[in-house]
Image: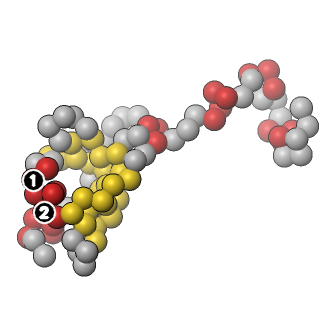
Amino acid sequence: MADWVKDLAIGEWFETGDADSFEIVGLDAKNEVVLVQRFDGTLEEIDFEDWAELKARPCAAPEDVSGALDDLRSDLPADRWQDPLDYLDGRP
């Protein structure tokens, strides 16, 4: 295992030269893979060899981490959001 892998930790954020940020969500030393999740929610496996060439540098986590989350509230009509229990049995 490469020595630099010991410096990585789950939950750390990185960015590349194109300012694309991602979070480390897993490390698989056996298969030599770094598991990352991009801001938009896309999951990706980066093998150790490619990680070394990626030249990723640590960065701060985004202030708004909702990039991967769907905003379901915007899909609901404002006038119908009176009682959330109404949606359990399909009543309007």
For label 1, the residue is 53
Residue 38 in the image: state x and y as whole percent. Answer: 34, 45
For the question of whether residue 30 can be seen, the reply is: yes
Element type at mark 1: helix
Q: What is the three-letter code of the residue carrying label 2?
A: Glu
Q: Quadrant of residue 19?
A: top left
When the figure is inspected, residue 73 is found, relative to residue 55, above or below; the finding is: above
Q: Quadrant of residue 17?
A: top left
Horizontal side of 9 relative to 69 (left or right) equals left
Residue in the image at 10% along x and 71% along y: 2
Residue in the image at 38% along x and 53% along y: 43
Judged from this view, the residue extending furthest toward the top is 79
Residue 12 in the image: state x and y as whole percent. Answer: 27, 53
Residue 92 in the image: state x and y as whole percent. Answer: 89, 32
For label 2, the residue is 49
Q: Are marks 1 and 2 in contact (CB under 8 Å)?
A: yes
When the figure is inspected, residue 55 is found, relative to residue 28, above or below; the finding is: above
For the question of whether residue 11 can be seen, the reply is: no
Judged from this view, the residue extending furthest toward the bottom is 30
